[in-house]
Image (cartoon, grey):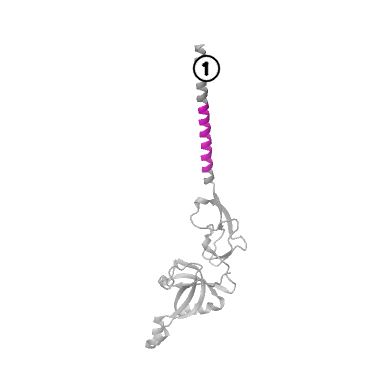
Amino acid sequence: MKWGKKITASRVKSSRWNDLRLWLGVSLLLGSMFIGARVMASGEETVTVWRATQDLAVGSSVGSSYSTIESVVVPARGLNGSYVVGLEGPSGVMLRAVGSGELIPSSAVGRELEPQHRIMTIPMDPLHIAVGLNSGDQVDVWSSPDESRVSASFGSDSSELLGASLILSNVTVLNIASDVVGTGGDIGVVLAVPTDSVAILVKAVRSGVIDLVQVPLDSTILK
């Protein structure tokens, strides 16, 4: 009788220990599965973005047909910057150039130009451009006679000829090519110029000094 009691007590203790190990194993398994699922989910998070399939120049149109751009799926964590995302591609005009194979930044696409405008690049002294001017901003274009040229032609009577004049208002800046430096340190500023004012601006650039004065975006030539 005593020996039987000892055997029964040993079996109960062993059974409880087995149950504890079973539940501990199940808990570890579930925990591992949960952690693995979270890691896999975070690692597979992707986003659809758009990239150029050929070089896109300033002023070129995108969106009417997707022959120059394509959608690609990339890891969300791999994006450094703000790009055009979504299943629907961008539509508008390029405000700055994007090379073939590059992702298209959201700031690089603006609204379509109206047909009565032309794209014109003018050389600008950086000190004659409003500080902080960006693509999409609007400017007034002022022209002043070149003091050295006027003095050479009119001598002491030139002072009254040196006044600045407003030649264009509310012109949209498409791009500022600060990485392209011309003679004398000038940089290229790309403007959307009304067709009937192109000759006026060309003459002003060739004959005098140009200043770009930033104005509020109250009106625009962009659709």
The correct choice, above or below, for 98 with respect to 191 in the image is above
> Residue 22: horizontal and vertical position, in percent?
53, 28
Q: In the picture, residue 221 is in which quadrant?
A: bottom right
Is residue 195 part of the magenta span, yes or no?
Answer: no
- Compared to residue 97, the image places residue 149 above or below, namely below
Farthest residue in the left direction? 156
Magenta stretch bounds: 19-39
For the point 53% across and 32% down, the residue is 26
Query: Which residue lies most toward the top here?
Result: 1
Residue 51, position in %: x, y?
Answer: 55, 57
Q: Which residue is mark 1?
A: 8
Q: Residue 165 or 51: which is nearer the viewer?
A: 165
Kindly identify the amino acid type of the residue bearing the numbered disc 1: Thr
Q: Quadrant of the C terminus?
A: bottom right
Is 25 magenta? The answer is yes
Residue sitting nearer the eye, 219 or 93:
219
Residue drawn where x is 52% and y is 34% of the image = 29
Give the number of callouts: 1
Q: Secondary structure at mark 1?
A: helix
Please give the name of the residue rendered at 50% of the width and 77% of the height, measured from the top-left corner: 168
Name the quadrant containing residue 156.
bottom left
Residue 219: give x, y in percent of width and height: 54, 73
Q: Main secondary structure of the magenta part?
A: helix
Residue 128 at x, y percent in the picture? 42, 73
Residue located farthest toward the bottom when viewing the structure as drawn: 157
The answer to whether residue 45 is above or below residue 164 is above
